[in-house]
Image (cartoon, rainbow, N blue to C red):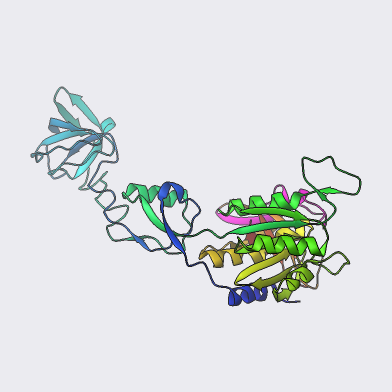
Amino acid sequence: MIDIKEAVNIIKNNLKPKEDVRKVSIINSINKVCAQDIYSPMDSPPFDRSPYDGYAYSANITKKELTIVGEVYAGDVFKDKLGKNEAIKIMTGGKIPDGANCVIKKEDVTVLANTIILNKDLKEYENYIFKGEDIQKNQLIIKQGDIITYESIGILASLGIDEILVYEDLKIGILTTGTEIQELNEALEDGKIYNSNKYILYSKLLKRGIEPIIVEKSKDCIMELESKIKSILKDVDILITTGGVSVGDKDLIPKAFKNIGGRELFWKVKAKPGGACYASIIDNKLMFGLSGNPHALIVAYENILVPTIDFLSNKTYNSKIQAIFKGSFTKKSSVDRYLNGRMYTSGGRIYVSMTDNKDSKARLWGTLNSNCMIKVNKESILEDGQLVDVVII
């Protein structure tokens, strides 16, 4: 058995990230991986503008009564230069005219016909948004390898950028195995279980912006497994299987991978749960066997497959942070253990607590309110207030 970190490194050393790129509209770029450094083609905002509804004028005056000589709404331009002791009515977002260097809020003046009386003294450039104050021209805004988010899409749109280069999506297939599994539209037979693993994996991949292109299931039959594995591999970069990776009579995945020409990278890792997993490659394609136990599947997926998928997708995202543990956990293990947890903030600090104190292998219930996993180092316990490693899920 090997450590999880070593398992990830072995995969990275034997596979290459995607190199194919394509141009997409930003409206279709959410969760894609940017394939270029993107620099701003302009200043944002593109002109000096007002942050409030009010009146623009020059703060370099002593007179309290100013003449209103025009008005500027968002999208309008006052083309003349503002004279001394003159003001212009301006709305939020309006372009500040030449000759003005501050904006007084409308509630801080008294309006008398075509004049205003200043009820407050302003300094130069008070209530004033400068051209390029948010983003400057030629500023690096998105780096190659960044995941495109709705925030970055908004910034791109505000700068007039409508298309970007992204890496091609990974093509991933899912094969759930086990004679005991049934689909949700089937009446559950005695001794059978519903195929929850398919839905867990599918939705987790969707969350990362990847829609599996093939989803199949197989009975515990070596010939059927080999046939379906070979068929799926024709169209995918990664094949993920569930079940059949331990040492029982029906744990056939390692044998099936080898029989079709797969080269073993590792079998089993030092983790609890999630230790039973199997990695193999063929023609620069990854075949990864996960446990049929849902909790174990999630641990191996998040700690091995997620960093692998990020690497192959050219992503620079890091899902691991530290938090302050609340509670206690005294069960030691000879390998690293992963607990379902919920992370939250309080008083400017990040905390995490367990969501399932029973820590049972067969329980999915503990994942329901979880947003992370808490790592417990081998031969260690957790005490209240201790800093722990957390994996965001």
Residue at the image position 28 percent from the left and 30 percent from the top: 107
Residue at the image position 80 percent from the left and 73 percent from the top: 334
**Number of labelled discs?**
0
Please tell me whether residue 364 belongs to the stretch shown in magenta.
yes
Please tell me whether residue 389 belongs to the stretch shown in magenta.
no
Residue at the image position 69 percent from the left and 72 percent from the top: 280
Q: Nearer the viewer, residue 249 or 87?
A: 249
Which residue reaches farthest top? 113
For the C terminus, give its image quadrant.
bottom right
- The percent position of residue 260, horizontal first and vertical second, equals 72, 71
- The percent position of residue 178, horizontal first and vertical second, equals 82, 56
Q: Nearer the viewer, residue 254 or 270?
A: 254
Q: Is residue 252 above or below residue 135?
A: below
Q: Is residue 50 left or right of residue 33?
A: left
Q: Is residue 272 above or below residue 393?
A: below
For the N terminus, give its image quadrant.
bottom right
Give the quadrant of residue 285. Answer: bottom right
- The percent position of residue 218, horizontal first and vertical second, equals 78, 56
Give the quadrant of residue 390. Answer: bottom right
Q: Is residue 53 left or right of residue 385?
A: left
Residue at the image position 23 percent from the left and 40 percent from the top: 103
**Main SS type for the magenta part?**
loop
- The percent position of residue 106, horizontal first and vertical second, equals 26, 31
Q: Is residue 221 left or right of residue 322?
A: right
Q: Can residue 355 be seen in this snapshot?
A: no
Q: Can residue 310 be seen in this snapshot?
A: yes
Q: Is residue 5 left or right of residue 40?
A: right
The residue segment tinted magenta is 348-371
Q: Nearer the viewer, residue 204 or 139?
A: 204
